[in-house]
Amino acid sequence: MEGKKHMNVTMTINGKKRSFETDPRTLLMDLLRANGYKSIKKGCGEGSCGACAVIIDGRPKNSCLLFAAQCEGAAITTTEGLGTPDNPHPLQSAFVKHGATQCGYCNPGSLIAAKALLDRNPHPTESDVREALDGNLCRCTGYVKRIEAVMDVASGGKKA
Amino acid sequence: MLKNLTQFYRPATVEEACALLAAKDRRNAVLAGGTHVAAVNDTTIEGLVDLGALNLSYIRRTEEGYAIGAMTPVQDIFKSSMLVGPAGQLLREASGKIGSTLLRHAITAGGNLMALFPWSDLPPVLLALDAQALCRRGVPKRTVSVKNLIETGPRHYMDQGEILVELQVPEFGLGTGVAFHKFSKTSNDFAMITVAVRITMQGETVKEARIALNAVCKKAQRRPEAEKELENMVPTPERIAAAAAAAARDLDMTTDFRASREYREEVLPVFVRRCIDEALHQALS
């Protein structure tokens, strides 16, 4: 495949096929935010904080460390694809219920990491949850509540 | 940022990728997981060759041990149920200590070796396990030891249009013990000291010892003088202490904001001794 200064990248975002004309230097985070996926937050910009996490072909990754062009043909899930204010995803409801929201900046990335975990392992241990969220920093230090929220969802709400 | 990046290639074959890397009219660089290249400031890179479509993500059992595709995410190594012996244990343990879960899904086995950062966790493990690297320059392929690859410098291979496609890691049976220690300020931070040890026993004597380091110096390396202190010897506490001291002797240790050279000189022998103790305990149990 011949490389190009300006290139088209096609990916499926939250179930919808989208094509973008972009520059080879464009990072996935910047491309998605410029096209309306504002749940993705720019935090550290170097893969340390997880605020920009998205699920790519089933894997949670930092979108600040990926070129958009690497995601040609990929299926991407952002927090916009989880639920709506009227019909939130169980994880979003659990974050609210357990007070895991704090200031909210890290929530989209944390939700994405939690979703990727439950997609692969619907019945995680607390240790599994801690490990899955180890790349999502919360500067409000709301680390315990979000673990309780994910465990709540994993247990089908029985731990509420 | 790659200010002068104008071309992005996603080759479908290894041959095509090698040809792009060997091109003389522009400087093309390999893109594996992207965690380094996406964050780096490098004005010399004009093109990126993304290896993501080459089907190099796999872990297979072989007669000798394991074959790990160069594009295998280190998270897959960490979670693999196929890696069961001492070598598998060492690979899983070190892979699980690379960055965070989000990073481990992006960082590849080949990228962690070929980028060859002082803080890379897999290079000392691969050295301790006598791993081989399968490299291809188009159709021709050759197997080189990871030790030679590190000493020559991965950049030399890539500049010649040669890419790493697979890591070949031997497995060891009863009588072999392994240990890995990564010493860092937090679990997600870069290492200040990384030690990987393999001990293979024959009766009460050490048949083969491998002691490999990273993070204390500019690139991963084995410590032959320390290994000699143990090989063909009964591993007494005095012998182990001598090996630990030898591992830190005549080593050009680095100073950075995480730790001074003097601090590393003091602490390194402690971690080497602990690793040898752990590996011996496993080998003898």
Image (cartoon, coloured by chain):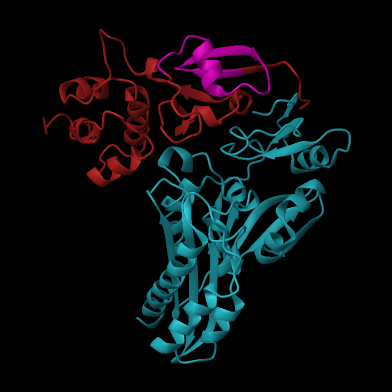
Chain colours: A red, B cyan
The answer to which of A55 and A39 lies nearer the viewer is A39
Q: Is residue A74 left or right of residue A134?
A: right
Residue B221 within the magenta-colored segment of the rendering: no
Residue B35 shown left or right of residue B192 in the figure: right
Does residue B210 appear in this view?
no
Please state, as top left, top right, bottom left or bottom right, where the C terminus of chain A lies in the image: top left
The residue that appears at 40% across and 16% down in the rendered structure is A39
Q: Is residue B267 above or below residue B242?
A: above
The one nearer the camera, B220 or A87, is B220
For the point 47% across and 33% down, which residue is it?
A61
Q: Is A120 situated above or below B63?
A: above
Image coords of residue A36 (percent x, y): 47, 9
Decide if residue B253 is in sight here: yes
Query: Residue A143: x and y, percent?
Result: 25, 35
Does the stretch in magenta take in A29?
yes
**Measured from the top left, where is residue B108 in percent x and y?**
56, 45
Question: What residue lies at 81% left-to-right and 50% top-to-bottom?
Answer: B139
Q: Nearer the viewer, residue B43 or A4?
A: B43
Question: Residue A109 vs residue A103: left or right?
Answer: right
Q: What span is in magenta?
A: A10-39
**As drawn, which residue projects farthest toward the right?**
B25
- Left or right: B64 in relation to A145: right
For residue B10, what is the image quadrant?
A: top right
Q: How many marks?
A: 0
The residue at 38%/19% (across/down) is: A79
Looking at the rendering, in which quadrant would you find the N terminus of chain A? top right
On the image, the x and y values in percent for residue B145 come to 68, 66
